[in-house]
Amino acid sequence: MKAKKLFLILIIVLSITLFFGSVDLGGSVEFNLNYEFPEEEESSFYNNFNKADLYFKFFGDGLRGEFNLNKASDDKLWVSSSKFTFNLNHIDLTTYWNRKSVSTDDWLKIVNNEKVGAVNGVKVYSDLDKFGKLNFYAVDRYGSLFNLLHYRFADLAGINSSVLYLKDYKDMSKRTYNELMGFDFDIGSFDAFKPYGEVVVSFQQDIYTASYDVSDNYLLFGGVRGKVGDFSYNFNTTYIADDFDKSYSPDSLAENIFLETAYKNVRLTNKLELEFGEENYIDRLRTNLYINNFELYVSPDFDGSFSDFNIDGSEMSVTYSHDLSIPFFTWYKISLYKQGTEDDWTDIKHYKPFRVYLEGNYKALGFSGNMKYIFGNPVSDEFFQAFGELYYIDISRNFNQFSVMGKLQFIQGIVEKRFTAYAEVGYNLPNGNIKFYVGDGDFENTLQFKKQIGVTTTFYF
């Protein structure tokens, strides 16, 4: 019975490939079959095919789409995500299933697809020519209706603006819903002086007692930019009231004052992170200086005001990269980072955060690749947050129709050691390719070697 399901998956791949190939559509079909070696001796061969992924992508006259068909470890065959777009007269109708696709393109990108999450539903996009462009979403988010309207007006004498409206029936059992209303603008009539900005208001409403009082539930963003000869500048500030709802917005959204200036190949940015109030709370200043391939980063830390300087929380880094025209090495990058100072500079294992980063590209005898070395505390802010060293190398080469690639990574910590490897061999077909692989190539999320093999086939039609 289980073997028949594997056979059924292969039949589906062949059938859909033949179907799309017989009609006036183009695209690709990708099929991935993965086998993870069992940890227990009694585990059966079939059950360790922990996933089978089938990915379709196609396009044609008035239609394009993509979807994933999966066999999970629980032996169920299911469509994990899909997106189909139908092109009508001046209107695109898109359907979503389990896709992170709801977002806006205002100045602050105030609605972020990662924060909204995966949704099911439809999107209507309309290019109204002289009357602007319209995006409307009607989707199911966590079992509740979620609507978003973003309308961008047509450009008028260099003035560009848009309005947005969001309504999230997040919990109808409690008769509550969220609303978001916003307006942004960009006045580009003069190159030397271009004002821009955005105003957004959020409301947490009761279905019977809705109120639109504006108190501490708003966001203000505004600035000016321009260019005179080789000199350019950009200044803006962001103010967020205490009760403004940031649950749909990117994590990077925060109060700050930003200034960027540039002259030819020199660029300087300053970002002051603070909390506005009766007494403004100064948190941190981030300054970046870029000169060709050189970057200097200085970030003093403060405890409320400029006079309350905190050297232990302050940061500094220097980065330099350069192309090379010598045998073997073709490019390199060096970066040094340090936070704070040390009471005992001889006890490196207990240093405050620091990092030495070396990276280079190489090419020899038809092979090419990348090498990295990291020494620090931590090795990485993301995947190994401890003191140690990281060694990484990858290598690849093409042999006519064949291609090979391999990579190794070793992390030596005080207590832990992590080693992982990945290799693949590919072969180009007349209308596609096939790839055999060993291990898991996602080294940031798989620090220890994963005992698995797999094959991925891609056909183009």
Image: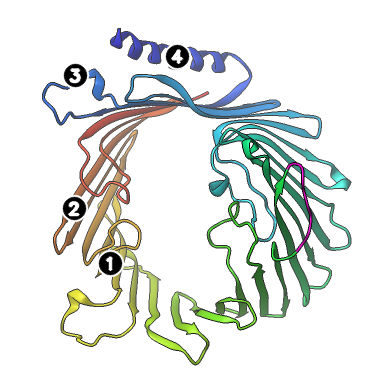
**Mark 1 surroundings: few (<14), some (14-19) or many (≥20) residues within 10 A:** many
Of the residues under marks 2 and 1, which one precedes in the sequence? 1
Label 4 or label 3, whichever lies nearer to me, is 3
The alpha-carbon separation of the residues under discs 4 and 3 comes to 24 Å
- At 38% from the left and 78% from the top, the residue drawn is 317
Left or right side of 165 for 47: left
Dot label at residue 378: 1
Q: Is residue 198 left or right of residue 272?
A: right
Region of the chain picked out in magenta, as a range: 207-214
Residue 262 lies in the magenta-colored region: no
Q: Residue furthest left?
A: 41
Q: Amino acid at mark 4?
A: Ile
Name the outermost residue toward the bottom.
307
Residues 91 and 151: in front is 151
> If you read the primary sequence from the N terminus, does the residue marked by circle 4 or circle 2 appear first?
4
**Residue at image mark 4:** 12
The N terminus, quarter of image = top left
Q: Which residue carries the number 3 mark?
A: 44
> Residue 388's quadrant in the figure?
bottom left
Residue 157's disc is none
* Up-down relation of residue 239 to residue 315 (above or below): above
Residue 149: give x, y in percent of width and height: 75, 44
Q: Which residue is mark 2?
A: 418
Distance, label 2 to label 1, CA atoms, is: 15 Å
